[in-house]
C-alpha cells in the first residue's frame, strides 16, 4: 500500500492557518488529510489524526489565558509586551475614526485573501491628535480584536538611550515585525519624525531615512502604528509612507457623556447629565476617565454606591483646572 502524504495545497493551507493563528482552519485541513488517508486505506492514521484534532479542540476550549510572546535578547530592552483586554466596544471615537478602524480590522482578518490577489492589507498606521484622545487605546483595541500581542516602543527613550546606535536598533525592531506577528506601537513618534529628533540635523535625517526604509519594507503580517501629538512638526515625507492616517480630536458632549457612563457603570445611574455637560467642556477622553474614577472612589469611601451629580461635577472641575494649570 502506498504511503499517505498531504498534498502541496494541504501543506500550504496548514502553514497559512498556523501563522495566522486560525486554529479552526488548521483543524479543518488536518481533517481533510485524515479523510485522504482513510480513502487510501490508512484507517489507523486517519483515526489518530481525528483523535488529535478532537483533543486539541477540547484543550483549546478549556484554555482561558493566552500567553504573551515576550521579547527576548537585545529587543527586550527596546519593547514592552502586553496582551490588552480592551475591545472595540470600549473605544469612544468619532464615526469617521470608527469606520477607519473597521476597515483596518476587516483587511487584516482577510489579509491572505488580499495577498493572494497581489494586494497588501492596511498595516502601517499614523495616529495623530491631542494627548488623551484615544491613540494608545486604539493600538490596544487593534491588538485585542486581532488576538495579537501589543509591542510598545517608546521612540524618545530609544533615541536618548542608544544615541549613535538608533539605526541598528530600528533594524532589530523591524526584524521582529517580520518574524513575529503582532501590533507594534511606536509611541512619541514626533521624537523621530519631527524637528526634535536630535541635536545633530545630519544624524536626525539619517535615522529618519532608515525608519522610512524599514517602514516601507515592513511585513504586512504585522500592524505597525506610529502615534504623535504633534502632526504639524512631522516631516512631510512621512505621510505618504503610511497606508492610513487617522486623526483624533476632543470628544463631543455626547461622546464625553458616553465615556463617563462607560467608566462609572452602575454607579452612574441617577446622574443628571445636563447638569454635567458644562464641566466636561474641552476635556480629553483620558481626563474624563480620570475624573470619573476620582468621583467613583470618593463615593465608595463615603459608603455610597451611586455617584452624585455634584460629586462628578466637582471631580470634572478639579481635573479640568489641573490640566490648565
Image (cartoon, helix red, strand yellow):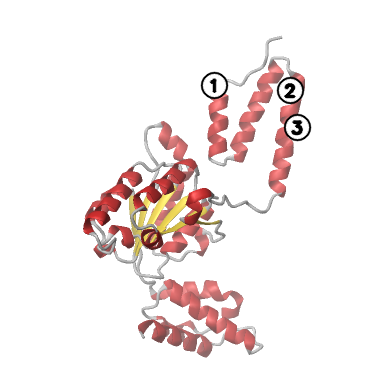
Q: Secondary structure at mark 2?
A: helix
Q: Along the horizontal axis of the image, is 22 left or right of 240?
A: right
Q: Can you identify the residue that label 3 sits on?
A: 51
Mark 1 or mark 2, which is nearer the start of the sequence? 1
Which of the 4 image quarters holds residue 130?
Answer: bottom left
Local packing at callout 2 (Cα closer than 10 Å; few below 14, some 14-19, many 20+) is some
Dot 3 or dot 2, earlier in sequence:
2
Q: Residue pushed farthest top?
A: 1
Report which quarter residue 134 is drawn in. Answer: bottom left
Which residue is the site of mark 1?
8
Can you say which quadrant of the picture contains the C terminus?
bottom left
Residue furthest front in the image:
164
User: On the picture, is 36 further left or further right than 251?
Assistant: right
Q: Are marks 3 and 2 in contact (CB under 8 Å)?
A: no
Q: Secondary structure at mark 1?
A: helix
Q: Position of residue 53 (x, y in %)?
A: 70, 34
User: Is residue 272 visible in this depiction of the protein?
Assistant: yes
Let me know if residue 242 appears in the view. no
Q: From mark 2 to mark 1, how far is it between C-alphas?
A: 19 Å
Q: Looking at the image, is 305 positioned above or below residue 131?
A: below
Please name the residue that numbered disc 2 is placed on: 45
Q: CA distance from mark 1 to mark 3?
A: 23 Å
Check the image and report above or below for 304 versus 75: below
Q: Around disc 3, counting alpha carbons within 10 Å, would you say few (fewer than 14), some (14 to 19), or many (20 or more)?
A: few
> Quick check: 272 left or right of 59?
left
Given residues 280 and 9, the one toward you in this image is: 9
Residue 14 against residue 257 in the figure, above or below: above
- Identity of the residue drawn at 69% across and 19% down: 37
Q: 202 and 239: which one is in front?
A: 202
Q: Residue 292 location in percent, x, y?
A: 52, 79
Amino acid at each position: 500500500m502506498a504511503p499517505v502524504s498531504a498534498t502541496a495545497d494541504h501543506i500550504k493551507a496548514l502553514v497559512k492557518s498556523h501563522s495566522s493563528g486560525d486554529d479552526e482552519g488548521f483543524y479543518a485541513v488536518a481533517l481533510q488529510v485524515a479523510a485522504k488517508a482513510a480513502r487510501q486505506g490508512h484507517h489507523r492514521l486517519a483515526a489518530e489524526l481525528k483523535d488529535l484534532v478532537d483533543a486539541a479542540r477540547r484543550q483549546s476550549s478549556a484554555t482561558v489565558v493566552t500567553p504573551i510572546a515576550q521579547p527576548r535578547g537585545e529587543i527586550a530592552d527596546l519593547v514592552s509586551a502586553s496582551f490588552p483586554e480592551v475591545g472595540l466596544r470600549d473605544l469612544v471615537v468619532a464615526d469617521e475614526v470608527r469606520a477607519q478602524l473597521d476597515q483596518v480590522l476587516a483587511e487584516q482578518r482577510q489579509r491572505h485573501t488580499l495577498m493572494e490577489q497581489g494586494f497588501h492589507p492596511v498595516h502601517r498606521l499614523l495616529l495623530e491628535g491631542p494627548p488623551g484622545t484615544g491613540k494608545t487605546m486604539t493600538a490596544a483595541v487593534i491588538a485585542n480584536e486581532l488576538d495579537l500581542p501589543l509591542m510598545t516602543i517608546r521612540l524618545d527613550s530609544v533615541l536618548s538611550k542608544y544615541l549613535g546606535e538608533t539605526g541598528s536598533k530600528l533594524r532589530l525592531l523591524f526584524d521582529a515585525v517580520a518574524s513575529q506577528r503582532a501590533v507594534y506601537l511606536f509611541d512619541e513618534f514626533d521624537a523621530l519624525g519631527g524637528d526634535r529628533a536630535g541635536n545633530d540635523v545630519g544624524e536626525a535625517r539619517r535615522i529618519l531615512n532608515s525608519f522610512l526604509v524599514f517602514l516601507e519594507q515592513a511585513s504586512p503580517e504585522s500592524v505597525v502604528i506610529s502615534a504623535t501629538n504633534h502632526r504639524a512638526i512631522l516631516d512631510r515625507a512621512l505621510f505618504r509612507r503610511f497606508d492610513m492616517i487617522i486623526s483624533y480630536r476632543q470628544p463631543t458632549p455626547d461622546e464625553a457623556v458616553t465615556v463617563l457612563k462607560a467608566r462609572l457603570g452602575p454607579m452612574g445611574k441617577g446622574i443628571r447629565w445636563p447638569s454635567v455637560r458644562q464641566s466636561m467642556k474641552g476635556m480629553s477622553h483620558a481626563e474624563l476617565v480620570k475624573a470619573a474614577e476620582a468621583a467613583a472612589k470618593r463615593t465608595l469611601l463615603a459608603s455610597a454606591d451611586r455617584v452624585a451629580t455634584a460629586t462628578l461635577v466637582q471631580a470634572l472641575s478639579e481635573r479640568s483646572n489641573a490640566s490648565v494649570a
